[in-house]
């Protein structure tokens, strides 16, 4: 037994499996001995009923031999049992010796060393020995039951002997033996029951071993299928052989339990009144809209802090909506095998970056996602969330220490850590809030540290190496940040595998949020009506955090005033946040709490009591210093006596040492911090100091929103005029030929100044208007192209432009203006004093709703627009219906319309054609290129061109889908006397020679008035040019300009054309 134990290693088997092996050894020793004894003594217990015969012993021996032959098939039972267990034990010994060195290696204490090699040798050999043992037990099971010992050793046996046999033994004469007879003897084997019992024991042992081995084999293979780590040596050794899986399972179970408990509800942005029932929104109910951008989007953000209020939904050429969390981690369609390992998620403050991180963590803990058995998305066995703001100290940590500081993670046991290290591809690390990290400038500088997992590094270095894949390669690392901090992770030789941007609510979601927030039909209607008609408020509400503050402020005002008129509700940024400040103080300061009269007094701008004002002044100083020093987190000693103000949020305590914890605070939101800083600036500085401060900080992006608040908070009359003058006179000038084009480098400053002027107008008299008019009196054309303007910006810009009476042309193309911005443009276009005749608003996502607002303006008598360019604006046939209705009105003065690069289609062109056929429509120039127009659309347009009422002289329909019949319809219209077209552009339309035949025939008619034709970039060959040349040879053809470039015309075709022109003395501007 000891010899066997030397060759049979315990650590090569699972606990239960080793017990079965030991049982096999024990049975292999005991049972063969038992059967050897039974078989050696069995004859003594075998007897037959033979009376009076002298050869009785011989007969009994003969009957026993016959009994053995019939019940053992000639193979001794003890030999069968010995062979049975000996072979099984030999298989176990061979397996144990083959994995002995691997097992000793895996007992190493160094987890990093164990992960250097990742093989499945142990798992494979374990499965092989199970399969061999299973096969052996199955073979012996069948042999015993069906082949060698099927009758199960009966105790009674009828022995049949012939008289010949008896005669040979008794010396009977041959004459007596001639009469052969057969005799029957009843025999009894008293050892049969004992032998039967031990035989059944062998049968049962084989059967149970067979079943156990089968179950273990199924279990091992199934677990290996769903868990790659289980197949590998270290995982198999720890989980199955050492049975340490419980440590891992318990760790995950406890971690997920903590996550589910602590993330069920999302903390509200604004705290509740003490004593009131706590209002919490379940995290599972919160929705965040995601758009995937291919590549970096850093360049699309305006450098500093002012992205906070740019509530826009951008339209990008390459983007993909995300419906599930798993989509974040899925590979690109063109590279399905390459999953992104470094992911940057950016978004403006309050947009929901931290909320998304909590959702990822919670969905994983609840088993909703990242579950390999579910078979969708990417599977993560471990998900850790880290807040950058918790690592602002100078301490050094390694990976294991980092994991222990994950949200709700707890201590990481060595067994768990080994499992994590062995499968980094199963680990998701989320780092939230890069912009809140105090040492972010060190991230790209930490190159002197090595790539040893056990080495302690500064957090900035550890994060950089994890993100770059230099440490813990294969793990997925997600980072969230505001756009302003992206420059700190611009690694020299590496970019993020994927960059995402979180966009907030759209208009429909804002309305739903307002409804859910109010839970009061009358109040909801008033709030939504006020928000929806004010572009500034609606744009603010795209950001969820701002939406909450807007709803909170407006609701309280309506409740305090008993839901009276909404005419005096706030509309500017300063008004909204001043209201929010007042209401927070009212609800949390004992002097005001639950006092409606005092709240109404404050909302009427009577001011806080001196004691409260002193507290706000101190908080303002803290807020100001924080912005100056780029700090969002403050120590408890800095905010002492102000903790209960309602304006601060206590963060999770930072651990200092083993026992001590340090309290930390931040303001409810960065915008609240900026408002308090602005109050501090306005209240403590004199006019000269305030002017100096504005001049010094005007170009710094981090002070943008503070600057807006300063403009909105200036109440004193002299101050307002002086401050307004600074903002207006600071507008950069680059005027040429009466065109104001702000320098590209100063575009951010221009937008900032417009917003400040808009804010200051709330309290200012009309003197600022004269300042604007005087400063820009010579401006006729304004170009604000490619300046990333949003609807909030347009609100401020329109507000200022209304006072520049000389403007006749505005170009705001290439921005981020939506339907809300168009609603603001409507206000400018419908002013009776407005002289605007030309508007370029192309390459903006205004959509059908935006065009509707512009169309309403066009149909008014006050609107003087004659040229409108709305190309590449995401307009469909629905939008064209509104525009067509406006064009058909006598009040509309539009003569030039460019709507190329949209999606109007045949239906849209049908609406437009109906308008063109009316006498009221004044359009003479129309560009409908690249609009998915086909034969049906061309038919409607051709019918309109053939009417006397249609005034079109220039038509561009390039890059469409003009068919033979479509061009035929157009050619027929050109041959009518009513058609006034003189210029036609049908380039990029795949026009062939056969199609050109129709047009050539039309050109040869006297009624056709075309003088300019562009048919470049088509499929015209020499044959097609011959048709065209023949038309040019006629006296009726009036063409003076022809573009046939980029076709399939050879020198022969050109020579033919030249001959025709020379013969007829034709003068033609030819582009070839």
Image (tube, rainbow, N blue to C red):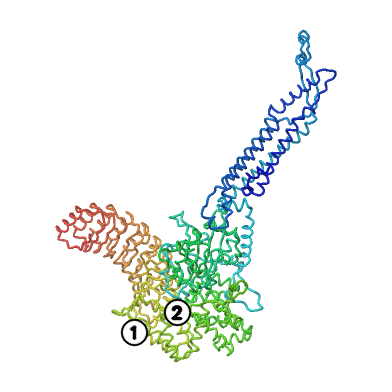
Q: Which residue appears farthest toward the top when viewing the image? A: 175
> x, y (%) of residue 147?
67, 30
Give residue 884's mark: none
Label 1, secondary structure: give it: loop
Mark before the other along the chain sequence, 1 or 2: 2
Residue 93 spot, x, y in % from top left: 62, 42
Cβ atoms under marks 1 and 2 closer than 8 Å: no
Pick the front one: 619 or 510 = 619
Left or right side of 275 for 1018: left
Name the side, left or right, on which 4 lies relative to 430: right
Indicate the quadrant where residue 487 lies.
bottom left
Q: Nearer the viewer, residue 25 or 998?
A: 25
Q: Residue at x 78, y 12 (%)?
A: 171
Which-is-in-front pick, marks 1 and 2?
2
Q: What is the x, y in percent for residue 346?
A: 47, 68
In this rendering, is residue 254 above or below 627? above
**Quick one: label 2, few (<14), some, or many (20+) residues within 10 Å?**
many
Characterize the local packing of mark 1: few (<14), some (14-19) or many (20 or more) Cα atoms within 10 angstroms. some
**Quadrant hosting residue 747:** bottom left
Q: Give the residue at mark 1.
A: 777
Which picture quadrant has residue 81?
A: top right
User: Which mark, residue 704?
Assistant: 2
Asked if residue 760 can be seen in this view, the reply is yes
């Amino acid at each position: 037994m000891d010899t066997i134990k030397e060759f049979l290693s315990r650590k090569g088997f699972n606990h239960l499996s080793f017990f079965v092996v030991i049982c096999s050894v024990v049975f292999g020793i005991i049972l063969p001995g038992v059967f050897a004894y039974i078989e050696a003594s069995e004859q003594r217990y075998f007897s037959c009923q033979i009376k009076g015969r002298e050869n009785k012993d011989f007969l009994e021996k003969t009957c026993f031999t016959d009994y053995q032959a019939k019940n053992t098939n000639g193979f001794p039972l003890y030999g069968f049992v010995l062979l049975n267990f000996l072979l099984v034990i030999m298989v176990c010994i061979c397996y144990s010796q083959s994995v002995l060195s691997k097992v000793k290696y895996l007992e190493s204490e160094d987890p990093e060393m164990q992960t250097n090699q990742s093989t499945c040798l142990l798992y494979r050999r374990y499965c092989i020995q199970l399969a061999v043992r299973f096969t052996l037990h199955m073979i012996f099971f069948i042999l015993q039951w069906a082949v060698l010992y099927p009758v199960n050793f009966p105790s009674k046996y009828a022995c049949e002997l012939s008289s010949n046999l008896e005669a040979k033994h008794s010396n009977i004469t041959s004459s007596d033996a001639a009469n052969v007879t057969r005799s029957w003897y009843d025999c009894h084997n008293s050892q049969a029951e004992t032998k039967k019992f031990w035989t059944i024991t062998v049968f049962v042992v084989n059967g149970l071993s067979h079943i156990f081995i089968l179950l273990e084999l199924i279990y091992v293979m199934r677990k290996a299928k769903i868990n790659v780590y289980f197949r590998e040596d270290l995982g198999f050794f720890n989980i199955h052989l050492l049975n340490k899986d419980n440590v891992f399972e318990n760790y995950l179970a406890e971690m997920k339990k903590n996550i589910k408990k602590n993330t069920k509800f999302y903390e509200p942005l604004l705290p509740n009144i003490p004593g009131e029932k706590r209002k919490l929104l379940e995290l599972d109910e919160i929705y965040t809209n995601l758009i995937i951008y291919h590549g970096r989007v850093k360049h699309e953000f305006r450098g500093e802090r002012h992205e906070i209020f740019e509530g826009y939904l951008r339209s990008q050429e390459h983007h993909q909506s995300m419906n599930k969390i798993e989509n974040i981690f899925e590979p690109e369609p063109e590279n399905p095998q390459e999953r992104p390992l470094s992911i940057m998620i950016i978004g403006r403050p309050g947009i929901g970056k931290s909320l998304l991180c909590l959702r990822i963590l919670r969905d994983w803990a609840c088993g909703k996602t990242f579950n390999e058995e579910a078979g969708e998305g990417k599977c993560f066995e471990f998900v850790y969330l880290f807040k950058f703001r918790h690592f602002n100290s100078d301490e050094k940590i390694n990976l294991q220490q980092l994991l222990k500081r994950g949200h709700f993670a707890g201590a990481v046991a060595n067994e768990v850590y080994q499992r994590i290290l062995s499968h980094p591809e199963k680990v998701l690390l989320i780092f939230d809030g890069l912009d809140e990290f105090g040492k972010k400038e060190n991230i790209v500088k930490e190159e002197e540290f090595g790539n040893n997992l056990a080495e302690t590094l500064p957090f900035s270095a550890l994060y950089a190496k994890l993100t770059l894949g230099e440490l813990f390669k294969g793990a997925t690392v997600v980072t969230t940040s505001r756009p302003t901090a992206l420059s700190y992770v611009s690694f020299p030789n590496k970019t993020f595998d994927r960059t995402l941007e979180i966009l907030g609510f759209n208009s429909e979601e804002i309305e739903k949020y307002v409804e859910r927030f109010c839970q009061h039909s009358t109040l909801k209607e008033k709030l939504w009506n006020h928000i929806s008609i004010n572009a500034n408020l609606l744009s603010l509400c795209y950001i969820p955090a701002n939406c909450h503050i807007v709803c909170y402020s407006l609701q309280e005002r309506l409740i305090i005033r008993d839901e009276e008129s909404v005419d005096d509700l706030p509309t500017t940024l300063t008004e909204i946040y001043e209201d929010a400040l007042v209401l927070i103080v009212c609800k949390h300061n004992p002097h005001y709490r639950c006092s409606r009269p005092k709240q109404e007094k404050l909302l009427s701008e009577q001011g806080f009591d001196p004691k409260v004002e002193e507290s706000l002044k101190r908080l303002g100083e803290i807020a100001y210093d924080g912005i100056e020093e780029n700090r969002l987190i403050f120590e408890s000693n800095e905010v002492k006596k102000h903790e209960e103000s309602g304006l601060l949020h206590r963060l999770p305590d930072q651990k200092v040492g083993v026992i001590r914890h340090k309290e930390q605070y931040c303001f409810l939101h960065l915008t609240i911090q900026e408002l308090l800083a602005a109050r501090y600036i306005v209240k403590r500085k004199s006019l000269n100091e305030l002017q100096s401060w504005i001049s010094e900080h005007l170009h710094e992006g981090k002070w943008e929103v503070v600057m807006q608040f300063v403009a909105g908070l200036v109440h004193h009359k002299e101050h307002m005029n002086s401050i307004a003058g600074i903002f207006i006179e600071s507008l950069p000038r680059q005027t040429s030929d009466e065109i104001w084009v702000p320098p590209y480098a100063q575009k951010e400053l221009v937008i900032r100044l417009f917003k400040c002027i808009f804010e200051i107008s709330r309290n200012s008299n009309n003197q600022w208007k004269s300042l604007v008019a005087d400063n820009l009196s010579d401006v006729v054309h304004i170009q604000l192209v490619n300046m990333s303007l949003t609807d909030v910006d347009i609100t401020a810009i329109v507000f200022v432009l209304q006072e520049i009476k000389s403007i006749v042309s505005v170009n705001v193309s290439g921005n981020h203006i939506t339907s809300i911005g168009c609603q603001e443009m409507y206000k400018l276009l419908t002013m009776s004093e407005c002289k605007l005749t030309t508007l370029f608003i192309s390459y903006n996502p205004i959509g059908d709703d935006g065009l509707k607002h512009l169309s309403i303006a066009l149909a008014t008598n006050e609107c003087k627009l004659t040229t409108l360019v709305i190309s590449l604006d995401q307009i469909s046939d629905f939008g064209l219906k509104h525009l067509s209705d406006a064009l058909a009105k006598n009040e509309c003065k539009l003569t030039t319309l460019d709507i190329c690069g949209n999606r109007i289609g045949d239906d849209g062109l049908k609406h437009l054609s109906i308008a063109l056929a009316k006498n009221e429509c004044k359009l003479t120039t129309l560009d409908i290129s690249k609009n998915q127009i086909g034969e049906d659309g061309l038919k409607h347009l051709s019918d309109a061109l053939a009417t006397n009422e249609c005034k079109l002289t220039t038509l561009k329909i390039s890059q469409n889908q003009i068919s033979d019949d479509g061009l035929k319809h157009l050619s027929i219209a050109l041959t009518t006397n009513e058609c006034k077209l003189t210029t036609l552009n049908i380039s990029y339309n795949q026009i062939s020679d056969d199609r050109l035949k129709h047009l050539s025939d039309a050109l040869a008619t006297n009624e056709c008035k075309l003088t300019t034709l562009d048919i470049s970039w088509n499929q015209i060959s020499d044959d097609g040019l011959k048709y065209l040349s023949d038309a040019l040879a006629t006296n009726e053809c009036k063409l003076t300009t022809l573009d046939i470039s980029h076709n399939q015309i050879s020198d022969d075709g050109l020579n033919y054309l030249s001959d025709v022109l020379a013969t007829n003395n034709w003068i033609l501007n030819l582009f070839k």
